[in-house]
């Protein structure tokens, strides 16, 4: 039987933060029905007026900074500086999407079947009700930005937040309401994913999922069964490349941010670094000095760089990868220990070398503060090894002049040159997502918004139908049309 309540615990000290009712599975269909009614009215609101709600939302997010940061931190255990990252991201993303939406949704004139006689336009109609399922690692900016794009496109949204972070989702819903979003267009349905997932997929018209590749695969299959759209932002084992011409101090600082921000629980975060031999030793020295200066700790203040892992499950998964690697001969260069003195789920930022194929750490996503270093002979080897993964989410390239050329050879959805992940992620007008087993579909940018629409072609025929004129036989019509199409084909 599904639990009746969700008990949310603070990762900082494993005490209870709050309790709220879990959504029973039979409440999903009525919620989607309410969303459908609201959506029909919302789709008729001009997109410029819809956009006004999101401009106001961006303002409200900025105005509620401390409450948002506190709630995120209490539910996830992340450092305040990491909570700030998603707060800033959300505030900027919804504003950018509000600016982009009217242009992207404008109907486009297309060449008609018969020049002058057929006037053809392509429209973007909303899909209807979008189901969004989110993980715990970014509980504010992911639903804020995904919902913003779905709603701007004229849809309603039902959000199933992660069971660990429902209060952050509720706070977001409160801000949507304050911004003037009509009732029932954004509903939060907290509860277990395995319990609510099937009911949600059975009712909605599109599923936007962020989470593990395993769950994404199951949901994609269920959506395929119903022939509804699915977009999945899934796992990664993201590589970072340090080339011979890199600024090593900047590369080391960027690597530290990319590997240990959000305590390493970042889908686009870096878990493996390929460093060309001639700069390897100097890079490692610089990196380890910077890792040693990281401040770990619990609490809602600003004096911490790295917070807690999110749960006992996360601590177990990270410990398992590191212990397995060390048992099989990896070298520990930094960290490598839980820190129960700081809180029950703390783990030190960890750097390893000598990681080999038989270690789980080598290819599996760790999703924690663990970085593996590899010495490579050349740029070519770095590219080859970076691409040797079933994932393809994000990559980072550090180089004074080779970054964009290397990017063209990497099989990933985003490449950050001289930054870890934030430059591409924060380019909200451009698409974000993964190749390979890192996902399908994109969020952000035109792909992120238009995926929540169905293209509809409307062709208006004027003056004469597409048929033989009165008094002209089929043979005469065939000859005229053959010549006409021949002429048209000469133009293009
Ligand atoms: P997860 O287990 O797949 O859970 C994610 C969400 O899916 C949660 O809300 C969960 O609900 C729900 N869920 C679980 N089983 C479900 C089912 N059968 N049907 C429907 N929903 C279901 O992922 P996680 O391990 O918590 O999250 C970490 C993963 O997310 C990592 O692999 C990370 O790389 C990925 N991620 C990717 C991105 C990206 O943009 N590519 C961003 C962030 C995270 P409950 O709360 O009940 O568990």
Image: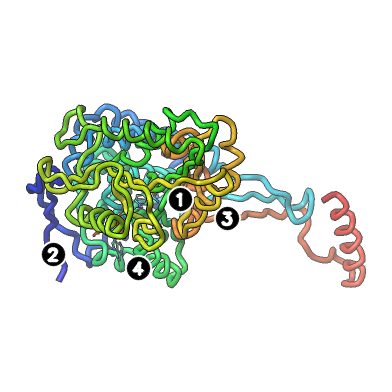
Proximity of marks 2 and 3: CB atoms separated by less than 8 Å:
no
Q: Which is more N-terminal, label 3 or label 1?
A: 1
**Callout 1: helix, strand or loop?**
loop
> Where ligand 1 lies, by image quadrant?
bottom left
Proximity of marks 4 and 1: CB atoms separated by less than 8 Å:
no
- Point out the frontmost of discs 1 and 3: 1
Q: Which is more N-terminal, label 2 or label 4?
A: 2
Q: Residues within 10 Å of mark 1 (few under 14, many from 20)?
A: many
Distance between mark 4 and mark 2 Cα atoms: 21 Å
Q: Is mark 3 within 8 Å of ligand 1?
A: no
Q: Is mark 1 within 8 Å of ligand 1?
A: yes
Q: Which is more N-terminal, label 2 or label 1?
A: 2
Distance between mark 3 and mark 4 Cα atoms: 24 Å
Q: Position of residue 405 (x, y in %)?
A: 61, 40
Q: Quadrant of residue 486?
A: bottom right
Proximity of marks 1 and 3: CB atoms separated by less than 8 Å:
no
Proximity of marks 4 and 2: CB atoms separated by less than 8 Å:
no
């Amino acid at each position: 039987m599904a639990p009746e309540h969700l008990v949310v615990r603070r990762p900082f000290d494993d005490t209870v933060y709050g309790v709220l009712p879990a959504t029973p599975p039979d409440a999903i269909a009525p919620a989607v029905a309410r969303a459908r009614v609201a959506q029909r009215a919302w789709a008729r609101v001009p997109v410029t007026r819809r956009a006004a709600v999101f401009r106001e939302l961006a303002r409200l997010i900025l105005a509620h900074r401390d409450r948002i940061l506190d709630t995120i931190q209490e539910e996830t255990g992340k450092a305040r500086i990491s909570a700030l990252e998603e707060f800033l991201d959300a505030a900027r993303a919804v504003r950018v999407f509000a600016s982009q939406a009217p242009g992207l949704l404008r109907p486009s004139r297309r060449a008609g079947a018969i020049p002058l006689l057929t006037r053809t336009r392509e429209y973007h109609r909303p899909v209807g009700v979008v189901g969004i399922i989110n993980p715990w690692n970014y509980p504010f900016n992911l639903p804020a930005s995904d919902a913003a794009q779905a709603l701007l496109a004229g849809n309603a949204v039902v959000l199933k937040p992660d069971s660990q972070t429902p209060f952050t989702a509720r706070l977001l819903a409160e801000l949507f309401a304050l911004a003037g979003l009509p009732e029932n267009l954004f509903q939060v349905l907290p509860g277990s994913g395995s319990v609510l997932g099937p009911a949600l997929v059975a009712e909605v018209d599109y599923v936007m999922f962020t989470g593990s590749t395993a769950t994404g695969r199951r949901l994609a299959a269920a959506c395929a069964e119903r022939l509804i759209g699915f977009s999945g932002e899934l796992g990664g084992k993201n590589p970072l490349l340090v080339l011979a011409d890199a600024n090593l101090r900047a590369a080391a600082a960027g690597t530290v941010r990319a590997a240990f921000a959000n305590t390493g629980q970042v889908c686009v975060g870096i878990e493996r670094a390929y460093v060309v031999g001639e700069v390897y030793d100097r890079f490692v020295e610089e990196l380890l000095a910077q890792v040693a200066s990281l401040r770990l700790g619990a609490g809602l203040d600003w004096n911490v760089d790295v917070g807690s892992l999110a749960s006992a499950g996360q601590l177990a998964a990270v410990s398992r990868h590191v212990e397995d690697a060390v048992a099989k001969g990896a070298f520990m260069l930094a960290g490598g220990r839980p820190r129960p003195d700081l809180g029950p789920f703390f783990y030190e930022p960890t750097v390893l070398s000598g990681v080999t194929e038989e270690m789980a750490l080598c290819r599996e996503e760790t999703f924690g503060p663990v970085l593996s270093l590899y010495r490579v002979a050349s740029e070519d080897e770095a590219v080859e090894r970076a691409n040797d993964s079933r994932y393809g989410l994000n990559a980072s390239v550090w180089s004074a002049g080779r970054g964009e050329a290397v990017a063209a050879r990497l099989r990933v959805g985003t490449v950050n040159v001289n930054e870890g992940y934030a430059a591409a992620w924060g380019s909200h007008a451009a698409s974000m997502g993964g190749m390979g087993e890192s996902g399908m579909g994109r969020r952000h940018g035109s792909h992120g918004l238009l995926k929540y629409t169905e293209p509809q072609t409307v062709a208006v025929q004027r003056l004469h139908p597409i048929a033989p004129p009165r008094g002209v036989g089929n043979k005469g019509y065939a000859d005229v049309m053959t010549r006409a199409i021949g002429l048209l084909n000469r133009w293009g």
